[in-house]
Image (cartoon, rainbow, N blue to C red):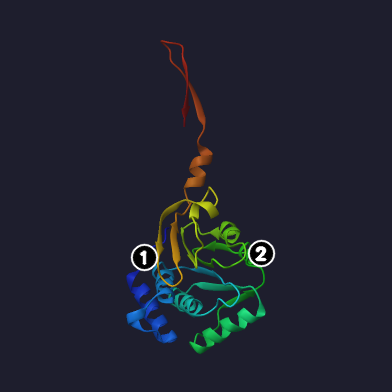
Amino acid sequence: MKLVWSPERASKAYIDTVKSCELDLQQSGESELISALAGGWNAKMIVEACSHGGAGATSVGLAIAAHHTGGRYICMVPDESTRQDYLNAVNSAGVSPPPEVVVGPAEEAVAELVGIDFLLVDGRCKGFGRLIRLAKLSHRGAVLVCRRTVAGFRWGGVLGSTTRIVRSVELPVGEGLDIAYAAGNTNSGSTKSNRRWIKHVDQKSGEEHLIRG
């Protein structure tokens, strides 16, 4: 099963984020878009990596999206100060119960999670490229978002060769968003492992041919 887009769920997550964060619909942007993406793709494992002081409206938006999808949302923060900022933001927005918060190196935390289908990473996080590479994505596919992107950022430069990006887009929203959709690998691994070389001998010429089976 692949990720399937739901316009209705995306719309609900979008509007609820606007209401909770008291945002202007005429000036909507980063947090609402991210919430709509996670909600619309029915993400079941939502993971966010925040930089120091980076928790805020986007975190509230993802918490709201997780509420609509019935998914799990984990916010990884580097220190206690950012954790408190995060809790203040979700409490002010009336998010209940509070989502999971992990304090410490995000690289260590993300390595323990399996089946991530929505990943949001702050480009100001230390070693954010390695963090993305360590993420164990869902076999259904995954939506990857990098905010506050740095110059020269490319998904191909941070992802391993086993992850195939179906499409990506860079948007001038907030301080810059890079969004990508990674294909699921349900069938690719087994197909590749079962293929083998078959030797065929032409009876007329005597030539040998190797055919990929």
Query: Where residue 56 sits: x, y (%)?
Result: 52, 80
Vertical arrangement, residue 162 with respect to residue 143, above or below:
above
Point out the residue furthest to the front here. 151
Q: Residue at x 61, y 79 (%)?
A: 82
The circle drawn on residue 95 is none
Which residue is at the front of the view, 112 or 179? 179
Q: Nearer the viewer, mark 2 or mark 1?
A: 2
Within the image, what quadrant is residue 86 found in?
A: bottom right
Q: Is the Cβ of the residue at disc 2 closer than 8 Å to that at disc 1? A: no
Question: Which residue carries the number 1 mark?
Answer: 5
Question: Which residue carries the number 2 mark?
Answer: 108
Within the image, what quadrant is residue 127 found in?
A: bottom right
Position of the N terminus by quadrant:
bottom left
Which residue is at the front of the view, 162 or 128? 128
Crowding near pointer 1: few (<14 within 10 Å), some, many (20+)?
some
**How many marks are shown on the rendered structure?**
2
Indicate left or right for 4 with 55 as reference: left
Vertical arrangement, residue 170 with respect to residue 31, above or below:
above
Q: Earlier in the sequence, mark 2 or mark 1?
A: 1
> What amino acid is at disc 1?
Trp
Q: Residue at x 43, y 74 (%)?
A: 30
> What amino acid is at disc 2?
Glu
